[in-house]
Amino acid sequence: MRIDIIFDTICPWCFIGKRRLEEMLSRRPQLNADIYWHAFLLNPDMPAEGTDFGNYMQNKFGGELRSQRLFAAIDQAGRSVGIEFDFAKVGRTPSTIDSHRLVRYAARDERASEMVETLYQNYFMEGRDIGNLSVLIDIGEKMGFDGADIREYLYSDEDIADIHEQNPRSHRLGISGVPAFIFERQFSISGAQEPNVLERMLNIAEEKQREFYEVGIQPV
């Protein structure tokens, strides 16, 4: 079963959606799920140095009261899947281009999901600036990757253009918000859906798979 996930590394609902997907998959231990992560830039024009997190949230959501209400809703949803958000520690809203590149780098060793989880924990729970290259290199090294190799990759232009292109690709698929989950390249759903909802989508994809095989058609 192929599952494509469209996400951003500073999207708290994407973190929650990831954990909910994992909860759903834990119910199906016999399922061989191949997960592919695709970048989405919530702030494609964000400067490389990022911006102040508090000001960004207030401007985006219309004031401190509304942003605090949002934090409360996210915190409650996060606790239900074992996430302890600590927004008080978050100082910057970073550009996410380089953190997405680090996920690409980890995917070479089939460790993309592990890297996504680590980035979320570093940003939302430890308040680290995941737009800072030194921070990203440190994260990679602590995961056991070669620091010099990560440094060479991140200080190059590799994958930057393609990550920028991911947004229009998603829009062409009719996806304008994240997280989004696509099962078997055909059945998509957006939002941090509950595990039961994701399982229904999985069941639909599995049924379609069976129909293909019964008539001798190989799914593309």
Image (cartoon, helix red, strand yellow):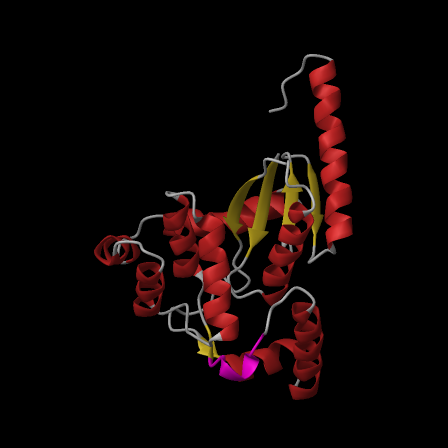
Q: Residue at x 64, y 34 (%)?
A: 184
Looking at the figure, which quarter contains the N terminus? top right
**Which quarter of the rendered picture does the C terminus lie within?**
top right
Instruction: Residue at the far bottom: name it.
Output: 64
Determine whether, in the image, residue 161 is placed left or right of residue 113.
left
4 over 59 or under it: above or below: above
- From the viewer's perspective, is residue 86 above or below residue 207? below
- Residue 24 visible: yes
Where is 80 relative to 193, above or below? below
Residue visible at 69% across and 87% down?
65
Residue closest to the eye, 123 or 94: 123
The x, y position of residue 5, in whole percent, is: 58, 48
Q: In this view, does 87 lie to the left or right of 91?
A: right
What residue lies at 66% left-to-right and 85% top-to-bottom?
Answer: 63
Q: Where is residue 157 in the image (x, y as percent from the top left)?
A: 30, 52
Magenta segment includes 141: no
Q: Which quadrant would residue 71 be assigned to in this image?
A: bottom right
Q: Specify start and end residues of the magenta stretch as a single range.
A: 85-91
Q: Is residue 48 left or right of residue 91?
A: left
Observer able to see residue 175: no
* Mark count: 0
**Which residue ends up furthest to the top in the rendered image?**
216
**Is 8 or 206 nearer to us in this picture?**
206
Question: Please, is residue 178 above or below residue 49 in the view?
Answer: above
Q: Nearer the viewer, residue 148 or 167?
A: 148
Residue 200 quadrant: top right
Q: Where is residue 20 in the image (x, y as percent from the top left)?
A: 67, 56
Q: Residue at 51%, 74% (x, y): give it.
A: 125
User: Percent from the top left, x then y, of residue 32?
Assistant: 59, 35
